[in-house]
Each structure stands twice: as structure tokens, then as C-alpha cells.
Amino acid sequence: MKINNFGPGNQNMSDTAFLLGLIGEGIQASRTPSMHEQEATAQDMRAIYRLIDLRKLGLGVEALPELLLSAERMGFNGLNITHPCKRAVVPLLHELSPEARALNAVNTVLLRNGRRTGHNTDWSGFADSFRRFMPDARRERVVQMGAGGAGSAVAYAAMILGVQQLTIIDIDAARAAALAEGLRTRFSDRRIVASGDLAKSVAEADGLINATPMGMASHPGLPLPAALLRPQLWVAEIVYFPLETTLLGQARAIGCRTLDGSGMAVFQAAAAFRLFTGRKPDADRMLRHFRSMG
């Protein structure tokens, strides 16, 4: 199968061939390209997926307008968006899905006929992963670290999953407070608060979610002191490279139940694949492929 006719105005030239990309910082180890390309091949389609790494290009978030325009001119069908661009991309789009608008964060952009439409599949990716791998975990009180673009999606997923009390902690206290306030307007029957008291919040929690970049290969380290962990706490990560973050390693060592970032990575990619191609992906096949990459 041969891809041809890519160029301005030709984004809909085929329903079996797609040009896709990922914009973010420090993304050379991303498994997203392989997941999309392999699933397309399994469905008798062709996908070419390119990394647009701000760090490798020596660019900052301010380059987003130029990168989006360049992708349109080169005939990209769609883009995934990751740290640190999930919120910065929002004002550059023509339309937003209801979830993306509510979260003010986008991880998937469709490029169609000169228009850019933003979606958020992070929240459903986390929710699907949690339901699959930790269905019986207690969700009365949960602490989430991180209130950025990914954090807003994961906090929304926590509400959908039935968390009764969510405490949000971020190095930017105003950002945590804004996220908590926004969620309270949609989930008025829950207790959603921003807090600066990490030790007290974790001591009272059933579970801990790390929605910060801490733990990534490009952001090594722990998002909180290891001494705050205890065996009764479940710990969930959104980071998937490496799968065994320092946080998960420390948590497992003392007997915590843990959830790594692989499920979220796969299920958000599956939802994005459906948006990009219009085809239903085989999420289990994508998960097997993800795990085969080591």
C-alpha cells in the first residue's frame, strides 16, 4: 500500500492511509508511534507516525502555532499532544470536544479541511486502565499529585470512577485550587479540595495518583518522600517510561498495590486511534504489542 497525495487540503484523501504525529518534550522513547502503526497494519491500513520533539528541535511551547501550521501544510491527519503542551494548544484550535472543553486540556488534535478539533482521551485512558486492573480498589479518599494538563484529565477520571474525596496537590497551589474548583461545579456531591499538607493528606488516603512528570526518564526522582508511603495505600502512575518508576518501586517494596502507566498509555492511544481513523481498535491487541516492547 502506498501513501500519496499528502498536502494541504488532502487530509481526507484516503480511509486506509494516515500521517500522524506526537508533539511534546523529551518523547524519543515514546511507544505511541509503534502502537498506532502496528494497529493500522493489523487492520489492513497504513499509518506513518512521526515524533515532533521540542527538546530535540531546540524549541519551546511558543513554537506550537508554527508546528501546527506546518503539520497542516504537510497533510497530517492528526496529532497527539503531550507534556508540556496539553493546555497551551487549546487556544490554537477551532473546536473542542465537550471533555476537552471541560478539562481545558487536549491530547488529540484532528486536522480536517483546514480546521483543528481538540479531544481528550487521557481521562478515559486512565479510567479504562483502573477499571481493568484495579476494579476493587477502595476509592473513598484519594490524593492526586499534579494539576497540569494530564492531571486535570486524571482528576476527572477519578470522579467518573466514583472517588468520594479527592485531594489535589501541585507545586503551583493556584493551579491545584483552580482544578478543584472546576471539578466541584461538575461533581457537587463530592468533596474535592486543593491542599498543601501532603503528609496529612496521604496519611488519610486510600490511594495515591501521581499525575506529575516526576518519574519519567527525563524527570527522574520521587514526587513525594518515600517515608509517606504505607502498605495499605494503593499507588497509581501515569508515567509509562520507565514502567517501573522510582515511586512504584518504592511502593511495591513495602507491599502497596500498584498500577503502572501502561494501561493509560494503551487505552488513550486506542481512543485516539478511533478518532484518527474512524475504525474501532483492538485494545487488547494494542496492549499485547505495548508489552512486547519490553
Image: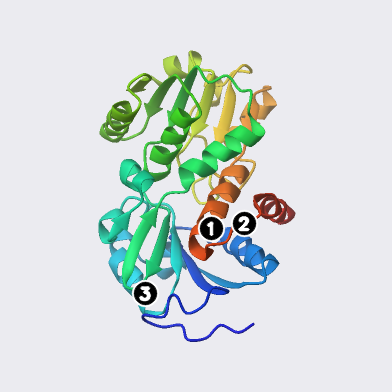
Mark 2–mark 3 Cα distance, whole angstroms, equals 25 Å
Residue 130 located left or right of residue 80 = right
Side of 201 relative to 182 (left or right): right
Check disc 2 and give the amino acid type: Pro
> Where 40 sits versus 13, above or below?
above
List the residue tagged with mark 2.
281
Q: Nearer the viewer, residue 216 or 6?
A: 6
Q: Which mark is residue 274?
A: 1
Estimate the x, y position of residue 193 in percent, counting from the top left: 34, 22
CB atoms of marks 2 and 1 within 8 Å: yes
Q: In the image, what residue occupies the spot 35% across and 73% down?
A: 113
N-term-proximal mark, 3 vs 1: 3
Residue at left 68%, top 22%?
255
Q: In which quarter of the image is residue 176?
A: top left
Q: Is residue 136 left or right of residue 188?
A: right
Residue at the spot 64% in from the left edge and 36% down from the top edge? 132
**Looking at the picture, which amino acid does disc 1 mark?**
Arg
Q: SS class of the residue under badge 3?
A: helix
State which tag comes first along the sequence, 2 or 3: 3
The residue closer to the viewer here, 5 or 60, is: 5
Query: In this orientation, which residue lies closer to the viewer: 154 or 276?
Result: 276
Viewer-nearest residue: 217 or 274: 274
